[in-house]
DNA sequence: GTTCAAGATTGTAATAATTACAAGTTTGAA
DNA sequence: TTCAAACTTGTAATTATTACAATCTTGAAC
């Protein structure tokens, strides 16, 4: 299923989540801004069109979306929680120079060791840190 | 090289880091408590023997140890930074029930995709969340 | 389209982790 | 022993997040 605003909206409707103006705007923002934004980024961008928007609403909405399974929380670095509308398993690379977070495909399931066979795994995160190709070129 | 207090102390000496009483105690604590402790845990445990120990010293020391490459910062969960004296690559599993963090072996190098071939990778973290075998048994 | 209760939003206050900073203390080389 | 550099400490500042109460919105029932 493609990650479009309409599809995600439908998914929320099916889960009986009420679709307020603010929630829809935040959802739309996440679909259009796949850069793994922080609360601060979401807030300062959306505030331009919605001057009364509260940061609390963003926190509440993101928590709701996470519970509903529509966003993934990215804690690749302490002190800057980020949010990803793409909840399928994939890796994240954070460039220490430009600060961008890149997605990359990785399937670690075949590598899960025997000693975790009796564990129930809910989420699998792969986080890399380093310098991206573009920043290496510039330097 | 084995992760003993003496070996690590020697490593710091070679890096010309001055070995204060507090720093050595914190290092020793990390060697003896491989549970990936938080600053709060380190502080409340060490305070028993060193009543004047400051939390700032713990933060400073941990930052110094990280820079020196002797500890790894674990940010498996927002709002609780943890520290690991074992800096070799390995995975971390956090049990949502008991809160324990388990180490497990994993070598993802063969899985690194082509699209990262031009990137410089400094650190590779693998974080799992779920319920550990013991907690599953009890329930 | 009115009514109304449940739920959502908002602004502010509270909480908690971390950092900044200045004053006092320790350390080790000379 | 001397002394400057580095370390430690306690407190204040900063920042991200949560709690909360008042207000507003929403949508189902009439
Ligand atoms: Mn992503
Ligand atoms: Mn570990
Ligand atoms: Zn970059
Ligand atoms: Zn457990």
Image (cartoon, coloured by chain):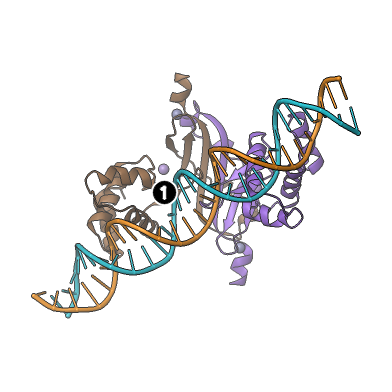
Chain colours: A purple, B brown, C cyan, D orange
Q: Which of A96 and B41 is in front in this view?
A: B41
Q: Tell me the quarter of the picture where residue C6 sits.
A: top right
**As drawn, is A116 to the left or to the right of A43?**
left
**As drawn, is B67 to the left or to the right of A64?**
left
Q: Position of residue B10 (x, y in %)?
A: 25, 57
Q: Vertically, is B75 above or below A137?
A: above
**As drawn, is A115 to the left or to the right of B4?**
right
On the question of residue A105 being in view, the answer is: no
**As drawn, is B80 to the left or to the right of A57?**
left
On the question of residue A63 being in view, the answer is: yes
Q: What element carries label 1?
A: loop
Q: Which residue is drawn at 45% across and 40% down?
A: B105
Q: Vertically, is A108 above or below B135?
A: below
Q: Nearer the viewer, residue A106 or A59?
A: A59
Quarter of the render that holds ligand 4: top left
* Residue ID for mark 1: B88
Chain for disc number 1: B
Q: Where is residue B57 in the image (x, y as percent from the top left)?
A: 32, 56
Q: Tell me the quarter of the picture where residue B24 sits.
A: bottom left
Q: Vertically, is A84 above or below A139?
A: above
């Amino acid at each position: 299923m493609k990650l479009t605003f309409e599809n995600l909206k439908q998914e929320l409707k099916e889960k009986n989540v009420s679709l307020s103006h603010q929630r829809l705007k935040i959802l739309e923002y996440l679909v259009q801004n796949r850069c793994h934004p922080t609360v601060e980024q979401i807030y300062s961008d959306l505030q331009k069109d919605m001057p009364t928007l509260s940061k609390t609403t963003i926190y509440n909405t993101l928590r709701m979306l996470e519970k509903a399974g529509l966003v993934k929380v990215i804690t690749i670095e302490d002190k800057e929680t980020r949010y990803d509308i793409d909840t399928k398993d994939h890796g994240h690379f954070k460039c220490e120079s430009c600060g961008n977070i890149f997605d990359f495909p990785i399937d670690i399931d075949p590598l899960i060791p025997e000693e975790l066979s009796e564990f129930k795994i809910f989420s699998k995160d792969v986080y890399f840190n380093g310098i991206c190709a573009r920043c290496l070129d510039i330097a």
